[in-house]
């Protein structure tokens, strides 16, 4: 067996023979004397030593094994109880510390108690020494970081190299030759970029390094702010953020070279203070960036200052990385005589349109242009005319046709817009950059109903057109056939007048108005108790319309009333996480003093009027959350929509309807043969009609030969005509008495009215009597007779009061045969 030995001079790892235990020997490599530790066993028949023994000092004791466990060659039998017994038992093994064979047997209970005591002492020790151990750990870690960490990289301030971007976009100086840093944005965002970086130090994890970078990213002209912010996050991680950094950068603004930059600083608070800094400046669609990253070391202050001072934005534009196929210059115009006028990027041609049910005339034009990348963009415009104002199914059919041409894969944005000189049109758009698939067909369509005609236009292509191109194409469209009237500016085709049950207000809103269930917050907005709060809501085309009616408790202070309306307006108009900055404008609202409050960051508007007893709040906002921190043009609500909604309000319960009711068309009613003496009349749209013969009493049979009752109901009233044949030879006095009795049983007294007078009139070319009842709003009645026939006609209310104008119109329309 051998004994491991380490040379104190050359640190060589050696194996000394067991025979050299406790002695000093020479190292075979450097000839330095070294001590061999003593062995715990006696070695028998060991090989001669390969080391030269230089000191056989007897003072170095050699441990001897116990007599009960003498060293023997492996596998030699252990002698039995009899000295001469050579019966083999088991091979001898090396004794181990704590072996039960070396110690006297201990009682089991005593062993368990001893183990429990040791474990308890250990736990107490760990609890008491935990704080100290933690301090020792951090002390050792700091020592290793400050005394054992590699030395930081230094950057020379001499021999810097200047780099000028070939397109004259920027100029920078680096401590050495910079290399191009490749980067590609997420999705299908098209960019051109040139980012240069100089790096000093290794790239291995934990090694000190420092890098300097500068460059630009040129986005397409139609880039969205969210895409730029997303690019900043990726570039920060790629170029500036230290590896250990996981927080939020500290942001400040700095002005360099007359330009304002956003500066993001990232610091890792460890012993060496890894730091990263990046500055951003957006010039049009070009994002400039410059910064450094000091990893596992402090930044070299002089080099950083020199690097930032040498950077210059030269102002060159590398060009749109995704140019439009059509140049928004002067486009040729197309005019459809008496219908519309539009402008296309080139000469348009006739476009085939589906056969639309009920369409009187249809015309669509289109123009397609091919981009350098091979994709195409199509522009179209036209109209569909009906014989009369289109019905809802007809409008929906035209809308589906138009959307299939421009946004065939559904839409992810809708709103009302002005189009062709008419307000309250519809816009549907599909931007694949905002969809989950990121690929497909983008497009935008607009259409509006103008009288009996629906006009439409749209753009379709794989890439969403730029805002300038959108406004140029749709802004050039003009409707020639008709101009909007006051009602067209107030009510969209799918809107209606809304009045709550208590008549608190009147407003034009989408038809799906519903009452919003109350919230716990509604009982005491802003901590002020109120009497009641009701919200009415309607939604359409990603836009929400809200009307709140607040009723205050008596003696509520003016300041508290204002706190309530301010809190409720903010609660409904401001999106969560958006700033509550707003602008106020004093206006007059339906005869009341009011405030128009605009929240630009939420693309919403609120109008507020507050009185002593009640307040009214109207809010119009986008149903969908604005896509960016500052809403884009597509998040804005058309001023014509805001005006139509707010200007339609009235707080007078007796205010006339916005749309005057159309006169109800009455139809002719004829008694028919076999149903008594004939007559004709005009009646409103009826719910039911009936004809029946009256069963006469014995006294009535002396005067009447037959009585037929014609009854027409239109819901709120019953219109009745009694056609009578007299018994031949009946005197005029008897006929009059019988008619009065019959009229009383059917009309006045039967409805709770009292006959107060009978006035002579001419009715249907015959002499007649008109009954006057008290009260006069329950029924109306007239009667006339000659030698052979008689008529009693009247009207009475089935529920409530009688519409006197309707009753008069019915009675005046009755004619009799000559």
Image: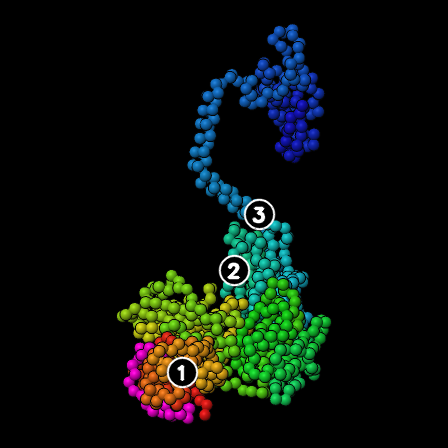
Instruction: Name the residue that disc number 1 marks.
Output: 705
Earlier in the chain: of badge 1 and badge 3, it is 3
- Under circle 1, the secondary element is strand
- Within 10 angstroms of label 2, few (less than 14), some, or many (20 or more) residues? some
Residue at screen point 66% across, 12% down? 88
Residue 714 spot, x, y in % from top left: 44, 78
Residue 571 spot, x, y in % from top left: 42, 67
Q: Is residue 498 above or below residue 132?
A: below
Left-right relation of 791 to 366: left
Residue 8's mark?
none
Disc number lying in front (2 or 1): 1
Viewer-proximal residue among 698 and 818 = 698
Left-right relation of 446 to 773: right
Viewer-proximal residue among 110 and 175 = 110
Mark-to-mark CA distance, 2 and 1: 104 Å
- Under circle 2, the secondary element is loop
Query: Is 120 included in the stretch rendered in magenta?
Result: no
Residue 149's mark?
3
Tell me where the magenta segment starts and ends, as one range.
Answer: 746-768
Quadrant where the C terminus is found in the figure: bottom left
Residue 249's mark?
2
């Amino acid at each position: 067996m051998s004994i491991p030995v380490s040379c104190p001079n050359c640190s060589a790892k050696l194996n000394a023979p067991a025979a050299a235990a406790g002695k000093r020997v020479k190292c075979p490599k450097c000839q330095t004397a070294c001590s061999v530790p003593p062995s715990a066993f006696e070695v028998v028949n060991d090989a001669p030593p390969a080391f030269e023994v230089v000191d056989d000092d007897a003072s170095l004791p050699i441990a001897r094994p116990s007599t009960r466990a003498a060293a023997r060659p492996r596998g030699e039998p252990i002698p039995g109880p009899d000295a001469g017994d050579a019966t083999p038992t088991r091979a001898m093994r090396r004794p181990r510390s704590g072996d039960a064979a070396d110690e006297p047997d201990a009682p089991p209970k005593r062993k368990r108690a001893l183990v429990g005591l040791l474990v308890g002492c250990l736990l107490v020790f760990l609890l008491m020494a935990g704080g100290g151990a933690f301090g020792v750990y951090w002390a050792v870690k700091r020592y290793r970081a400050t005394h054992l960490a590699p030395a930081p990289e230094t950057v020379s301030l001499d021999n810097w190299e200047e780099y000028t971007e070939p397109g004259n976009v920027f100029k920078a100086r680096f401590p050495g030759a910079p290399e191009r840093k490749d980067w590609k944005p997420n999705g299908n965002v098209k960019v051109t970029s040139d980012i240069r970086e100089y790096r000093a130090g290794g790239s291995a994890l934990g090694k000190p390094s420092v890098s300097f970078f500068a460059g630009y990213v040129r986005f397409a002209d139609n880039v969205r702010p969210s895409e730029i912010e997303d690019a900043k996050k990726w570039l920060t991680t790629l170029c500036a953020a230290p590896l250990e950094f996981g927080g939020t950068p500290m942001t400040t603004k700095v002005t360099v070279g007359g330009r304002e930059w956003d500066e993001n600083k990232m610091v890792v608070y460890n012993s060496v203070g890894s730091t990263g800094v990046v500055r951003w400046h957006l010039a049009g669609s070009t994002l400039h960036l410059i910064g450094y990253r000091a990893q596992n070391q402090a930044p070299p202050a002089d080099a950083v200052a020199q690097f930032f001072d040498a950077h210059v934005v030269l102002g060159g534009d590398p060009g749109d990385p995704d140019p439009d196929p059509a140049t928004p210059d002067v486009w040729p115009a197309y005019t459809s005589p008496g219908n519309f006028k539009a402008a296309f990027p080139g000469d348009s041609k006739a476009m085939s349109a589906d056969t639309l049910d009920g369409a009187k005339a249809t015309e669509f034009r289109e123009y397609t242009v091919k981009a350098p990348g091979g994709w195409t963009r199509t522009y179209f415009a036209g109209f569909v005319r009906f014989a009369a104002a289109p019905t809802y199914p007809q409008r929906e059919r035209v809308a589906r046709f138009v959307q299939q041409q421009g946004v065939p894969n559904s839409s992810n944005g809708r709103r009302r817009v002005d189009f062709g000189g008419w307000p309250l049109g519809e816009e549907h758009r599909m931007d694949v950059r905002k969809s989950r698939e990121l690929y497909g067909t983008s497009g935008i369509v607009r259409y509006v109903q103008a009288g009996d005609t629906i006009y439409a236009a749209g753009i379709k292509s794989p890439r969403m057109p730029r805002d300038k191109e959108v406004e140029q194409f749709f802004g050039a469209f003009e409707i020639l056939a008709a101009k909007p009237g006051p009602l067209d500016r107030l009510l969209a085709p799918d809107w209606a007048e809304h009045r709550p049950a208590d008549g608190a207000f009147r407003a034009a809103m989408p038809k799906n108005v519903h009452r919003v269930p109350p919230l716990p917050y509604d009982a005491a907005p802003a901590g002020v108790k109120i009497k009641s709060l009701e919200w009415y809501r309607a939604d359409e085309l990603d836009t929400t319309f809200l009307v709140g009616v607040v009723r205050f408790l008596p003696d509520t202070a003016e300041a508290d009333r204002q706190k309530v309306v301010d809190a409720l307006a903010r609660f409904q108009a401001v999106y969560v996480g958006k700033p509550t900055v707003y602008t106020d404008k004093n206006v007059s609202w339906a005869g009341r003093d009011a405030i128009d409050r605009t929240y630009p960051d939420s693309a919403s508007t609120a109008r507020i009027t507050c009185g002593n007893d009640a307040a009214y709040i109207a809010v119009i906002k986008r149903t969908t959350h604005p896509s960016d921190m500052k809403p884009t043009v597509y998040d804005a609500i058309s001023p014509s929509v805001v005006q139509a909604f707010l200007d339609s309000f009235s707080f007078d319960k007796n205010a006339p309807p916005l749309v005057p009711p159309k006169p109800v068309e009455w139809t002719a009613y004829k008694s028919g043969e076999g149903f008594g003496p004939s007559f004709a009349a005009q009646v409103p749209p009826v719910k039911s009609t009936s004809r029946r013969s009256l069963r006469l009493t014995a006294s009535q049979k002396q005067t009447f030969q037959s009585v037929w009752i014609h009854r027409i109901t239109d819901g709120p009233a019953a219109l009745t005509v009694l056609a009578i044949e007299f018994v031949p030879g009946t005197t005029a006095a008897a006929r009059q008495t019988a008619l009065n009795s019959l009229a009383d049983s059917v009309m006045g007294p039967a409805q709770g009215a009292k006959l107060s007078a009978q006035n002579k009139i001419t009715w249907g070319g015959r002499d007649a009597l008109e009954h006057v009842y008290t009260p006069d709003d329950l029924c109306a009645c007239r009667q006339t007779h000659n030698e052979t026939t008689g008529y009693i006609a009247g009207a009475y209310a089935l529920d409530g009061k009688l519409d006197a104008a309707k009753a008069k119109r019915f009675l005046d329309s009755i004619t009799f045969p000559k």
